[in-house]
Amino acid sequence: MAVHVLDNYYLSITFLISLALQASLFITSYAFQTDKLTDLGGATNFLLLALFTLFAGAPQTYHTRNILASTLVMIWSIRLGGFLFFRVLKTGKDGRFDEMRSKFFSFMGFWAFQLFWVWTVSLPLTILNSPQVSDPASGGGQPRFGSARDIAGIILWALGFAIEAVGDQQKYLFKSGKPPKGAIMDKGVWKYTRHPNFFGEIVLWWGIFTLSLEPAVSHETTKEGRNALYGSVVGPVFITLLLFFVSGLPLAEKPTSQRYYLLTHGPDPEPGDKWSEYKAYLSRTSILLPIPPSVYRRFPESVKKTVLLDFPMFAFREDVDGPKAVEEARKKRVENNA
């Protein structure tokens, strides 16, 4: 018999589970001044929510759709969490936290946001496995597995998972090979998109949402359950907006361009014109959507900056950002030599 905890959608209990995990990891990480648990904590949270909602809803959740959707999330979380944990163990630290690791409230803010991220993105699976959707005693029910939406969801997840996993592995091997300073990773899936990991993660979560949608579309559950499933679109929308406008592209695009600009125009330039090489890479490589370079380079800039999502907000402007970057680099060199 399905377990009913606090509400019929498992929203409260999954939030409390996430709160307990993230709070305990924050306390541990702050006490030991380590950031080795940050990404592992997020992946583990996804895993726990998938496990809890699947087994708490048993036996009603022992349906192909529920088991498959839960398993796909578990596979993704184990793969990503394991990879990121291995990487941070090899590097010794995560440079993203250098400015906040020792600041209590700043560091706590990261863990609070991670809680919200995991809970929100997990909503399609959480609601799919909830009594309101899957327990006949609450008016729920699961239609026969194998619809076009089920297949489309699996395909989307598999495509996104493969691109993200292959991209992570290729980038890790590239960096492990100690490439020359200023070398550009444009092999494998990185030849077709500057951010295959972001693209893959967005696509796979839209796949989970699509896979979870059939009970609502087929009217096998109550009106409340259908509305909840449709409303869970906030999960994939959130991860899409997050990677586009908060923690993904904004933290990767302009800072990377600045680094290559300084390799040529900074106070300690490297041999060769690294900035021109990188601009050529930008002009032939899509920011997110995988597109062959021979095709992408032919599009006019107006199309790249709109339809193909390479918005002006991501661009490093040489006339405005260049002088600021050089001045900051000079000040930093003076401080380091003082």
Image: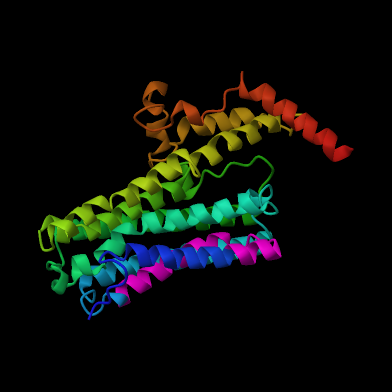
**Residue 83 on image: x %, y %:** 53, 63
Quarter residue 183 falls in: top right
Q: Residue at x 56, y 45 (%)?
A: 185
The question of residue 48 being in magenta is answered with yes
**Residue 101 on image: x %, y %:** 67, 54
Above-or-below relation of 306 to 166? above
Residue farthest along the left direction in this orientation: 219
The question of residue 167 being in magenta is answered with no
Residue farthest along the right direction in this orientation: 338
Above-or-below relation of 35 to 231? below
**Residue 98 on image: x %, y %:** 69, 50
Q: Residue at x 14, y 72 (%)?
A: 136
Q: Which color scheme does this rendered protein use? A: rainbow
Quarter residue 213 falls in: bottom left
Asked whether residue 298 is in view, the answer is: no
Q: Quadrant of the C terminus?
A: top right
Residue 117 in the figure: left or right of residue 96? left
Residue farthest along the front direction in this orientation: 6
Quarter residue 277 falls in: top right
Residue 275 in the figure: left or right of residue 43? right
Above-or-below relation of 190 to 319? below
Q: Residue at x 17, y 57 (%)?
A: 224
Looking at the magenta stretch, what is its main secondary structure? helix
- 212 or 89: which is nearer to us? 212
Asked whether residue 117 is in view, the answer is: yes
Number of callouts in the render?
A: 0
Q: Quadrant of the N terminus?
A: bottom left
Above-or-below relation of 281 to 145? above
**Residue 262 on image: x %, y %:** 69, 31
Tell me which segment is drawn in magenta: 26-55
